[in-house]
Image: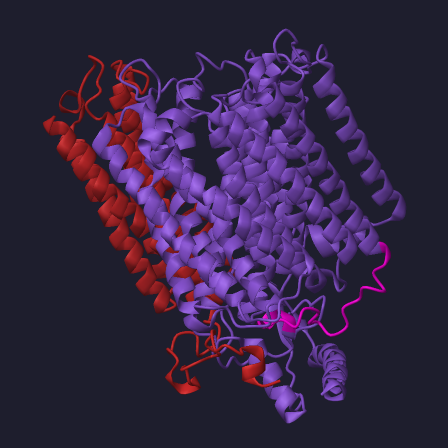
Chain colours: A purple, B red
Amino acid sequence: MLGKLNWGAIPIDQPIPLIAAGAIGLILAGVLAWITRAGHWPYLWREWITSVDHKRIGVMYVLLGLVMLIRGFVDAIMMRTQQAAAIGGAQGYLPPEHYDQLFSAHGTIMIFFGAMPFIIGLMNFVVPLQLGVRDVAFPTLNSVSFWLTAAGALLVNASLVIGEFARTGWLPYAPLSETGYSPGVGVDYYLWAIQISGVGTLMSGVNLVTTILKLRAPGMSYLRMPMFCWTALGSNMLIVAAFPILTATLAMLTLDRYLGFHFFTNEAGGNPMMFMNLIWAWGHPEVYILVLPAFGIFSETFSTFSSKPLFGYRSMVLATLFIVVVSFTVWLHHFFTMGAGGDVNAAFGIATSVIAVGTGVKVFNWLFTMYGGRVRFATPMLWSIAFMLVFVVGGMTGVLLAVPPADFLLHNSMFLVAHFHNVIVGGVVFGAFAGLTYWFPKAFGFRLDERWGQIAFWLSITGFVIVFGAMYVLGLEGMTRRLQHIDNVEWAPGIYVAGGGMVFMLLGVVAQVTQLVVSIRNRDALRDETGDPWDGRSLEWSTASPPPSFNFAVLPDVHGEEAYWTVKERARKEQSLGDAPQYEAVHMPRNSATGFVTAFFATLTGFALVWHIWWLVAVSLVGAYATFVAFAWRDEGEVEIAADTVAAADRARRTARQAWLDRQEGAA
Amino acid sequence: MSASATDPHHLGHHGGNMKDDDAPGRGEGGPAPQRIVTSYGFWIFLLSDIVMFSGFFAAHAVLAGETAGGPSGRELFEMPRVVQETALLLMSSFTCALGAVATERRSMAWAQGWLLVTGLLGFAFLMLEVAEFTTMIEHGAGPGRSAFLSSFFALVGCHGLHVGVGLLWLGTMMAQLWVKGFRDDILRRLSCFNLFWHALDIVWVGIFTLVYLLGSGL
């Protein structure tokens, strides 16, 4: 009846996961109870859960990303403390089988459910606004994408208390991940969680590529798109081209595990090396899927907070597309030591060094953007400058690792761990935080508290440098990664320093949460009346904060590279906002529960597949199909927003802009 | 605020040399109509689907020789049946296109008729494939026998799964067309289905050539 599932799946003998799951369960139950008592369910259902508005979906993506970043950070704290507590004779508090799950879950959660939703959420929220349109190409599909990602995250977290998670690392290398060596449900949880959320990511990629290529405001030609849209285009093209490889690879591993196929086994002609090649053919482009949008965010912040146009816009576009193409030619550097031979290693080593040129172009462009500008050191700009400093270091150590002989010494060491955290935390996470503080007022209508933002920044960057600086040194001293116990006591100082750095990072996280709480409390003082709190240059700042559901009362008419800056310049020159436009009724897509219901059935399907509950698999698949048919059968896909409503919303915005213009006049 | 104040060293190009009228025409006209957007998006999805197939093709290319002492393609593949399958699928693509023509002419009877024929041909194809798989498994040449057979079953089976899902879609689509008539959204979905069905044909041509023709020579 319940397949492999029985009471033995609950780890009653292990206090740590039980307590953790208990705490999460209590918090979750508390939140749900509070929502029920306050009567927020109808509002949540109507305005968020069934919403197909790209802004709402973007916010939910970012929220999911933030929560999962904290979950992954807790894993990181446990790893650091375990290592610090297990040097020489000491054994620490985590047994090896639990520690292995921890580092696997840490990587999986941080990449797939922390960084990815965060970045996709920002793209979802910002791209249609920057392009001057009212939604993405496929709004309901967008909701399906988000909820499938959430379903994957739910499955990973369910593994904490029902069964176990993979012990194979964040990429389940074969043959370790085959049934012979990983007989439990851990790898199965990984496979289905990633497959389900991967479908969501792929759909999101299709959606955003179509949006950027086919839906742009009049006059928004390719070379007038803001840089963030270009990098989003690059990133989503990579999603469309790379994620299917992941789907195919994990499907093969699934067939091996469930039906006795021999893709990656040691027996019957299977080829484990093929797993390395396939997984990294996805895995390396994935790095750029994450970091390209972050580069876009930095391009926006450097330009805005330097009060200057982005330097070298066209070279930026070229560098982005160069990275998109070359990212598919470097995957083998992830396993130089696995016997490809000198010539092959040399070719991939050179390709890896060459891809750094694209990033180098960008770094110089950002520097020259700041040069001669009037730089404002607001929180997003602090994250951006810190990014530029630490990312150059991460890039250099990357180029060092790209040299195969050096890689033979450094591979699988803490140096490698320090390198990729250096670029992913310093690049993607800093970018995400810069983007969060930058666009937060656009999403919610009030700015984040600047003082707490700066405190969070300084604590995080201090902790970051200490933790990963120590890891670089440990790696050079020969310490390998993923150690549950440290035999060599000479590494103790470095491990303690890294542990000390974690305290700063933890305080940084606390400061970020405090920033959020303080800002929400003081929201009236932090209110953004004009819709343009940073003196921005692209179209998202031309509408109100938060924007109306239809984004723009009238689609903007774009002239020149910096669409909104041009408009503001004209307004300043002519001392007038121009005549009020002719308002027309707007048609917006109707809300739909399709995404939520599909994800519900997808979660059930995934859970049933993990535990071999075959009848539940069948029932859930039929349920998912029925949901789609019900969606396809509806007759009214759109709601009309009357011209009067549109006009009223825009009049309020124009009043605020007029006040801004008057202030400008007074200042001049 | 003049341009020199915002850019005193003339480092950025401020909309620069691009005058409004010499900008590239793309994007000038604003968002594309829904019909274009839907088909375009579906094309992008199909490209991603083909990338997924290419993963399975690549795996088959690597593992085709790994028979682990078991039967090879030459002993297993029955070319007459494969030719029949190919003929059925190519014909179904043709009838699918005829269905699109009937749809253009807004002829409900012909459109439904051709879609039905398409579905029957697809179903016959699928039955032949199932028969082939069953025979092979009965003769001890299942996917667990060797890496070569694993990759064969996965690649051909993945295509078969697509045909199966396509049939389910087709049936749903016919019912929708029947109930809702030639509505705009129904027409968009029909054109997506057409793209999907033809794409499956393209993948099959690859399978026929690379798996069966080359494989039966090994």
* Point 33% across, 41% down: residue: A330
What predominant SS class does the magenta segment belong to? loop
* Point 62% across, 39% down: residue: A464
Quadrant of image for the C terminus of chain A: bottom right
Residue A599: horizontal and vertical position, in percent? Answer: 60, 41
When the figure is inspected, residue A45 is found, relative to residue A369, above or below; the finding is above
When the figure is inspected, residue A80 is found, relative to residue A370, above or below; the finding is above
The reply to whether residue A608 is visible in this rendering is: no
Tell whether position A540 is magenta: yes
Q: Given the current orientation, which residue lies at the most extreme right position?
A: A37
* Point 32% across, 37% down: residue: B55
Residue A74: horizontal and vertical position, in percent? Answer: 68, 30
Residue A400: horizontal and vertical position, in percent? Answer: 39, 37
The reply to whether residue A365 is visible in this rendering is: yes
Query: Residue A165 or A626: which is nearer the viewer?
Result: A165
Q: Given the current orientation, which residue lies at the most extreme top position?
A: A89
Q: Given the current orientation, which residue lies at the most extreme left position?
A: B217
Report which quarter residue B53 is drawn in.
top left
Query: Residue A499 or A483: which is nearer the viewer?
Result: A499
Tell whether position A567 is magenta: no
Query: Residue A183 or A465: which is nearer the viewer?
Result: A465
Chain part drawn in magenta: A521-541
Quadrant of image for the N terminus of chain A: top right
Q: Horizontal placement of A402 versus A565: left or right?
A: left
